[in-house]
Image (spheres, grey):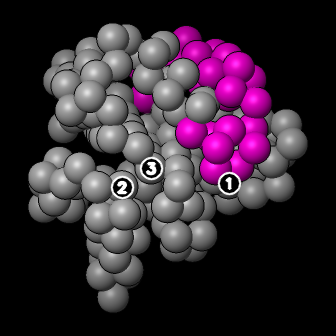
Amino acid sequence: MQLSSILKPVAIKVISAASSKKRLFQEIGDLAFVAYGLKPEVTVDTLLERESLGPTGVGHGVALPHARLAGLDHVVGVFVLMEKPIDFASIDRQPVDLAFALLAPEDAGVEHLKALALVSRTLRDSALCAKLRANRDPAALYAILTEGQSVQAA
Protein backbone atom coordinates (compact mmCIF):
# COMPACT_ATOMS: atom_id res chain seq x y z
CA MET A 1 0.00 0.00 0.00
CA GLN A 2 1.26 3.46 -0.96
CA LEU A 3 0.17 6.80 0.50
CA SER A 4 -0.62 7.93 -3.03
CA SER A 5 -3.31 5.23 -3.18
CA ILE A 6 -5.21 6.72 -0.23
CA LEU A 7 -4.39 10.43 -0.46
CA LYS A 8 -5.36 12.74 -3.33
CA PRO A 9 -3.47 16.01 -3.91
CA VAL A 10 -6.77 17.88 -3.50
CA ALA A 11 -7.16 16.35 0.01
CA ILE A 12 -4.32 18.47 1.43
CA LYS A 13 -4.76 21.87 3.01
CA VAL A 14 -2.76 24.40 5.00
CA ILE A 15 -4.82 26.34 7.51
CA SER A 16 -3.66 29.33 9.50
CA ALA A 17 -5.40 28.21 12.67
CA ALA A 18 -8.06 25.90 14.01
CA SER A 19 -9.49 27.09 17.30
CA SER A 20 -10.25 23.57 18.50
CA LYS A 21 -10.20 19.89 17.64
CA LYS A 22 -13.82 20.17 16.50
CA ARG A 23 -12.93 23.06 14.16
CA LEU A 24 -10.06 20.98 12.74
CA PHE A 25 -12.48 18.10 12.14
CA GLN A 26 -14.79 20.52 10.29
CA GLU A 27 -11.88 21.46 8.01
CA ILE A 28 -11.21 17.74 7.46
CA GLY A 29 -14.90 17.16 6.73
CA ASP A 30 -14.90 19.95 4.14
CA LEU A 31 -11.77 18.54 2.49
CA ALA A 32 -13.22 15.02 2.47
CA PHE A 33 -16.29 16.39 0.70
CA VAL A 34 -14.21 18.14 -1.98
CA ALA A 35 -11.85 15.20 -2.50
CA TYR A 36 -14.14 12.20 -2.02
CA GLY A 37 -17.73 13.46 -1.99
CA LEU A 38 -18.30 12.53 1.66
CA LYS A 39 -20.92 14.43 3.65
CA PRO A 40 -19.02 16.86 5.88
CA GLU A 41 -21.35 16.53 8.87
CA VAL A 42 -21.13 12.72 8.81
CA THR A 43 -17.33 12.86 8.62
CA VAL A 44 -17.13 15.33 11.53
CA ASP A 45 -19.58 13.33 13.67
CA THR A 46 -17.77 10.02 13.13
CA LEU A 47 -14.36 11.58 13.84
CA LEU A 48 -15.70 13.16 17.05
CA GLU A 49 -17.31 9.86 18.05
CA ARG A 50 -14.01 8.00 17.54
CA GLU A 51 -12.08 10.71 19.37
CA SER A 52 -14.38 10.34 22.39
CA LEU A 53 -12.94 6.82 22.83
CA GLY A 54 -9.46 8.27 23.26
CA PRO A 55 -7.37 11.00 21.68
CA THR A 56 -5.60 10.25 18.42
CA GLY A 57 -2.70 12.62 19.02
CA VAL A 58 0.31 10.31 18.74
CA GLY A 59 2.98 12.78 19.86
CA HIS A 60 5.59 15.07 18.33
CA GLY A 61 2.88 17.39 16.98
CA VAL A 62 1.14 14.67 14.98
CA ALA A 63 -2.48 13.48 15.12
CA LEU A 64 -3.99 10.53 13.25
CA PRO A 65 -7.76 10.92 13.59
CA HIS A 66 -9.63 8.07 11.95
CA ALA A 67 -13.15 6.74 11.57
CA ARG A 68 -15.26 4.25 9.67
CA LEU A 69 -17.91 5.62 7.33
CA ALA A 70 -20.74 4.14 5.31
CA GLY A 71 -20.50 4.69 1.58
CA LEU A 72 -16.76 4.21 1.17
CA ASP A 73 -15.31 1.32 -0.79
CA HIS A 74 -11.68 1.88 0.25
CA VAL A 75 -9.61 3.82 2.78
CA VAL A 76 -9.05 7.50 1.96
CA GLY A 77 -6.95 10.17 3.62
CA VAL A 78 -6.94 13.89 4.31
CA PHE A 79 -3.86 15.84 5.43
CA VAL A 80 -3.92 19.20 7.21
CA LEU A 81 -0.98 21.36 8.22
CA MET A 82 -1.85 23.99 10.82
CA GLU A 83 0.31 27.09 11.03
CA LYS A 84 -0.77 27.49 14.65
CA PRO A 85 -0.73 24.20 16.63
CA ILE A 86 -3.77 23.20 18.71
CA ASP A 87 -4.20 21.19 21.88
CA PHE A 88 -5.14 17.63 20.98
CA ALA A 89 -4.74 15.85 24.34
CA SER A 90 -1.78 14.02 22.75
CA ILE A 91 0.10 11.37 24.67
CA ASP A 92 3.13 13.68 25.03
CA ARG A 93 0.93 16.72 25.82
CA GLN A 94 2.42 18.61 22.85
CA PRO A 95 0.13 20.64 20.59
CA VAL A 96 -0.61 19.26 17.12
CA ASP A 97 0.19 20.95 13.82
CA LEU A 98 0.13 17.91 11.48
CA ALA A 99 -3.08 15.90 11.14
CA PHE A 100 -3.56 12.98 8.78
CA ALA A 101 -7.14 11.73 8.92
CA LEU A 102 -8.03 8.27 7.66
CA LEU A 103 -11.58 7.42 6.66
CA ALA A 104 -12.35 3.77 6.08
CA PRO A 105 -15.35 1.71 4.97
CA GLU A 106 -17.49 0.41 7.84
CA ASP A 107 -16.39 -3.16 7.15
CA ALA A 108 -12.70 -2.40 6.52
CA GLY A 109 -10.59 -4.63 8.70
CA VAL A 110 -7.01 -5.25 7.70
CA GLU A 111 -7.00 -2.48 5.04
CA HIS A 112 -7.79 0.17 7.68
CA LEU A 113 -5.09 -1.15 10.02
CA LYS A 114 -2.48 -1.29 7.22
CA ALA A 115 -3.28 2.29 6.21
CA LEU A 116 -3.05 3.46 9.83
CA ALA A 117 0.30 1.70 10.26
CA LEU A 118 1.61 3.20 7.01
CA VAL A 119 0.64 6.75 7.96
CA SER A 120 1.98 6.27 11.47
CA ARG A 121 5.35 5.00 10.17
CA THR A 122 5.57 7.83 7.66
CA LEU A 123 4.84 10.58 10.19
CA ARG A 124 7.19 9.06 12.76
CA ASP A 125 10.06 10.25 10.54
CA SER A 126 11.20 13.51 12.17
CA ALA A 127 13.07 14.67 9.03
CA LEU A 128 9.95 14.19 6.90
CA CYS A 129 7.83 16.08 9.46
CA ALA A 130 10.38 18.93 9.45
CA LYS A 131 10.06 19.13 5.65
CA LEU A 132 6.26 19.20 5.94
CA ARG A 133 6.40 21.98 8.53
CA ALA A 134 8.73 24.03 6.30
CA ASN A 135 6.28 24.03 3.36
CA ARG A 136 2.97 25.77 2.80
CA ASP A 137 2.21 24.60 -0.74
CA PRO A 138 -0.27 21.68 -0.87
CA ALA A 139 1.42 20.26 -4.00
CA ALA A 140 4.80 20.26 -2.23
CA LEU A 141 3.23 18.65 0.86
CA TYR A 142 1.74 15.90 -1.33
CA ALA A 143 5.13 15.29 -2.96
CA ILE A 144 6.88 15.14 0.42
CA LEU A 145 4.32 12.71 1.82
CA THR A 146 4.25 10.39 -1.18
CA GLU A 147 7.97 10.53 -1.98
CA GLY A 148 8.91 10.07 1.66
CA GLN A 149 6.82 6.92 1.84
CA SER A 150 8.42 5.52 -1.30
CA VAL A 151 11.92 6.20 0.01
CA GLN A 152 11.10 4.47 3.30
CA ALA A 153 9.88 1.42 1.45
CA ALA A 154 13.15 1.13 -0.49
Q: Is residue 54 above or below residue 152?
A: above
Q: CA distance from mark 1 to mark 3?
A: 16 Å
Q: Answer with the quarter of the image where residue 94 lies.
A: top left
Q: Which residue position holds label 2?
A: 138
Q: Nearer the viewer, residue 140 or 96?
A: 140
On-image quarter of the C terminus: bottom left
Q: Residue at x 60, y 69 (%)?
A: 5
Find out whether the residues at labels 2 and 1 contact each other: C-beta distance under 8 Å. Answer: no
The three-letter amino acid code for the residue at tag 1 is Val
Circle 3 sits in a helix, a strand or a loop, which is it?
strand
Q: Is residue 103 visible?
A: no
In the image, which residues are magenta?
31-56
Where is residue 67? Give x, y as percent. Answer: 64, 33
Q: Is residue 84 magenta?
A: no
Q: Position of residue 57 (x, y in %)?
A: 35, 29
Residue 113 drawn at (x, y percent): 60, 52
Circles 2 and 3 in contact, beta carbons < 8 Å? yes
Nearer the observer, 86 or 68:
86
For the question of whether residue 141 can be seen, the reply is yes
For the image, the number of numbered tags is: 3
Dot 3: within a 10 Å radius of its alpha carbon, few (fewer than 14), some, or many (20 or more) residues?
many
Which residue bears the numbered disc 3? 12
Label 2 sits on what residue type?
A: Pro
Question: Real-space Cα distance between discs 2 and 3?
Answer: 6 Å
Q: Is residue 114 left or right of residue 143?
A: right
Q: Which mark is residue 75?
A: 1
